[in-house]
Amino acid sequence: DNDKKTFLFFAGGSSGSSFSYKYFQKLVEAKYDINIIYVCGKNEKLKNKAKKFVQKYHYKNVQIIGFSNEVNNLLSISDVVITKPGGLSITESLEMKKPMLLIPGNGGQELYNAKFVCKNGYGMNCLTARHLVKNTEKILKRKSIIFSMKNKLKKYNNNKSIEKIYNLSKKLLKD
């Protein structure tokens, strides 16, 4: 529905983490007037579980998909990205200037990524499923929050990260 905000929810990596499911479930149960795209990666078990949940309770405007080569297109139609703070999803969201709601990651580099995103006002940490629901509600009720994130993202120095990763990958594959 083009009249609603679209939340793109990455379940976590190409294999899709089951950890994100409780966050997804709470967000859907909140019944906000939004579109949700839940990307499960190659985790067919997670994909089927999410589809059954959505069908059982007749939730509308929720799309469950598996692995996709169309991440750029999904990002372009989304208003907000929900993801763990992995390097690739953060880089893609920054490059596409998309506000983020971050669910807990695996520690290490992902802690740094989350701090970077939140410190610069590009997104918000959601340490529990309840925090995700509350922060979603804040974004929907107070338009200034998403407006502020988008303005800060516009000023983000586009350091051509994706282009650099592509060129490095090309070079490494040649060698």
Image: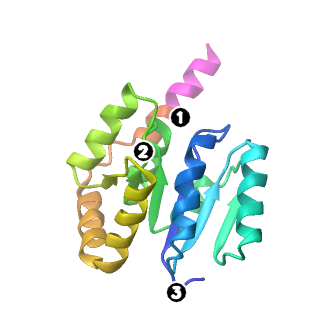
Q: Is the residue 117 above or below the residue 145 in the image? A: above
Instruction: Determine the CA span between mark 3 and mark 2.
Output: 26 Å
Q: Secondary structure at mark 3?
A: loop
Q: Position of residue 150 (x, y in %)?
A: 30, 65
Residue pointed to by mark 3: 3
Residue pointed to by mark 2: 90
Q: Secondary structure at mark 2?
A: helix
Earlier in the chain: of badge 1 and badge 3, it is: 3
Write down the region rendered in magenta. Answer: 166-175
For mark 2, does the 10 Å Cα neighbourhood hold few (<14), some (14 to 19), or many (20 or more) residues?
A: many
Q: Position of residue 108 (x, y in %)?
A: 38, 24
The quarter of the image holding the C terminus is top right
Earlier in the chain: of badge 1 and badge 2, it is: 2
Q: Is residue 168 magenta?
A: yes
Relative side of 67 to 124, left or right: right
Of 98 and 166, which appears nearest the observer? 98
Q: Is residue 26 visible?
A: yes
Q: Is the residue 121 above or below the residue 134 in the image? A: above
Q: Secondary structure at mark 1?
A: helix
Instruction: Determine the CA span between mark 1 and mark 2.
Output: 16 Å
Q: Residue at x 70, y 51 (%)?
A: 68
Residue pointed to by mark 1: 166
Identified by mark 3, the residue type is Asp
Of 87 and 52, which appears nearest the observer? 52
Q: Is the residue 68 above or below the residue 56 in the image? A: above
Residue reaching furthest to the top: 175
The answer to which image quadrant residue 149 occupies is bottom left
The answer to which image quadrant residue 146 occupies is bottom left
Q: Position of residue 55 (x, y in %)?
A: 76, 70
Q: Residue at x 48, y 33 (%)?
A: 165
Q: Is residue 163 visible?
A: no
Identified by mark 2, the residue type is Ile
